[in-house]
Amino acid sequence: MAPAGGVWHRSNEGRPGNTNVLVVEDDQGVRETTVAILREEGYVVVQAADGVDALELLRGHDIDVLLLDLRLPRMDGAAVLEALDRPPTVVVVSGFESFEEAEMRRRFGSVLFDCLRKPVSPHRLMAATAAAADHALSVRDTDTGTGTGGTEVRDDPER
């Protein structure tokens, strides 16, 4: 079933084709460029333009890596993270200032895998995504012995 935010693209090439990535970015140009770069590398990618749509996609799909902007309409990135009981591997990609990054790491340190400041070069984006994918796949393969990690979203994200 195709997600509301886009079409799943699968690849048969190695690790990336086994990694589901959700790109959450409100700037359409940045989002489409990011998605294109990841798909070119063989990742399975779905996208959302805001936090509300991101939570819907996280509820309905097994996401391994979440590339998350902080400043989003309808629900910001921090609220998305707060709504997740079992988040995927999270890479924050935002135009945040250093004090915002420190605050994000203080609040969500156990959840954040990496923080990237915009603008991000394609090389840096791919390096961070590959490292997050390696981490996500190692967690997925060892999580409860089932081979699937699974993101859990609270029914009431306002809690």
Image (cartoon, grey):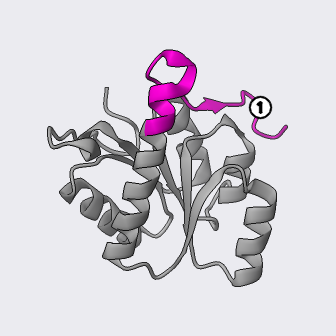
| Residue 28 picture location, percent across and down | 40, 67
Q: Residue at x 46, y 82 (%)?
A: 119
| Residue 126 picture location, percent across and down | 34, 65
Mark count: 1
Any magenta on residue 141?
yes
Q: Is residue 22 visible?
A: no
Q: Relative to 80, does residue 145 appear above or below in the rendering? A: above
Q: Is residue 124 visible?
A: yes
Judged from this view, the residue extending furthest toward the left is 12
Position of 27 with respect to 152 (left or right) is: left
Q: Residue at x 47, y 31 (%)?
A: 140
Q: Nearer the viewer, residue 135 or 19?
A: 135
Q: Residue at x 37, y 56 (%)?
A: 130
Q: Relative to 18, does residue 146 appear above or below in the rendering? A: above
Q: Nearer the viewer, residue 10 or 46?
A: 10
Q: Quadrant of residue 91?
A: bottom right
Position of 45 with respect to 79 (left or right) is: left
Judged from this view, the residue extending furthest toward the right is 159
Q: Quadrant of the C terminus?
A: top right
Q: Relative to 14, does residue 150 appear above or below in the rendering? A: above
Q: Which residues are magenta?
A: 138-159
Q: Nearer the viewer, residue 39 or 59?
A: 39
The residue under label 1 is which amino acid type?
Asp
Secondary structure beneath dot 1 equals loop
Q: Relative to 2, does residue 118 appear above or below in the rendering? A: below
Any magenta on residue 140?
yes
Residue position for label 1: 156
Q: Quadrant of the N terminus?
A: top left
Position of 8 with respect to 131 (left or right) is: left
Q: Quadrant of residue 153?
A: top right
| Residue 118 picture location, percent across and down | 50, 79
Q: Residue at x 46, y 53 (%)?
A: 132
